Amino acid sequence: MSAQQEQDTAGAKPGRRRRPLWRRMLKSRDGAAAIEFAILAIPYFLIIFATIETFVAFTAEQLVSTAVNNLARELRTGNITYNLGRSTDMTKVQFRTAFCDEVSILITCSDEEIATPSQLYLDVRTFPTFGDIPTSIPRVSSAQFADIDPSSFAFTPGGAKSINMVRALYRWKVMTDLVRPYITTIRPADGSMPTDFLIVATTAFQNEAYP
């Protein structure tokens, strides 16, 4: 027996047995904080990323809504007209460009996007009465999260005193993989990973009796 072992034996209390190794390991608290954090990391970061994604998406939604209201005001007052032979006339592409300028803080429209919509859809039409204005989002099927169907969208605002609708739909890309299944509102029919949160803003109004 070594001198160290003799010293440990001499210092030990009579009748006291050393605990088995597995009991000493269970009682040890070394590294407990790191283990607990590893267990809680996934739900913790899920909540953080969901909060950030929701906040940014809400900000984009407010931005799109503001753009709809601003351009609707221009149409209502005659500062933007369509097919009236005036200097204020705008084509569909010019109107889409003006809309993209309004949302450029968060949303960037490429020249291709302005010419051929794939994310931003604008529906600007005139109707005989307010009751004829559509109140639902057109979708390709009756499924709750089906893709949108923009085939009926057009750019045909009316002139003075006409009843009009300006509607914008934007596919907002959700960036965080873990959050996508919970906040997306467009989900592919083939079961692939959803990516889009649909932003919708609509306003209906009657144009002023401008000259």
Image (spheres, grey):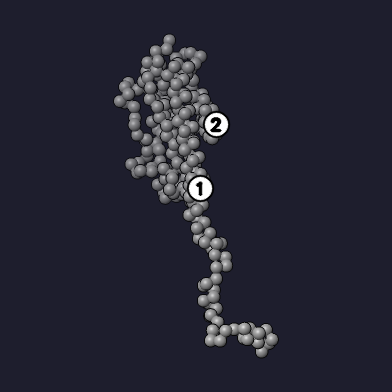
Q: Is residue 136 above or below residue 76?
A: below
**Above or below, comparing residue 151 to residue 191 in the picture:** above
| Residue 22 position in % (x across, y down) | 52, 77
Secondary structure, mark 2, is loop
Using residue 27 as the reference point, say whether residue 11 is left or right of it: right
Q: Amino acid at mark 1?
A: Phe
Residue 43 appears in view: yes
Between discs 1 and 2, the one toward the N terminus = 1
Q: What amino acid is labelled 2 in the image?
A: Ser
Q: Nearer the viewer, residue 33 or 3?
A: 3
Residue at image location 57% in from the left, 84% down from the top: 13
Cα distance between the residues tagged 1 and 2: 24 Å
Toward the viewer: 114 or 36? Answer: 36
Query: What residue sits 50% from the left and 48% below the top?
Result: 48
Task: Tell me the crowding category of disc 2: few under 14, some 14 to 19, or many 20 or more residues within 10 angstroms, Cα based.
Answer: few
Which quadrant of the view contains residue 209? top left
Query: Percent from the top left, x then y, of residue 171?
Result: 46, 38
- Quadrant placement of the C terminus: top left
Q: Position of residue 198 (x, y in %)?
A: 43, 39
Mark 1 surroundings: few (<14), some (14-19) or many (≥20) residues within 10 A: some
Who's the residue at 67% across and 84% down the image?
4
Taking 157 as reference, is 44 left or right? right
SS at mark 1 in the image: helix
On the image, the x and y values in percent for residue 26 come to 51, 72
Which residue matches tag 2? Answer: 104
Residue reaching furthest to the left: 131
Q: Please give left or right for residue 163 compared with residue 56 in the image.
A: left
Residue located 62% across and 83% down the image: 11
Q: Which mark is residue 49?
A: 1
- The residue furthest bottom is 1
* Pair 1/2: label in front: 1
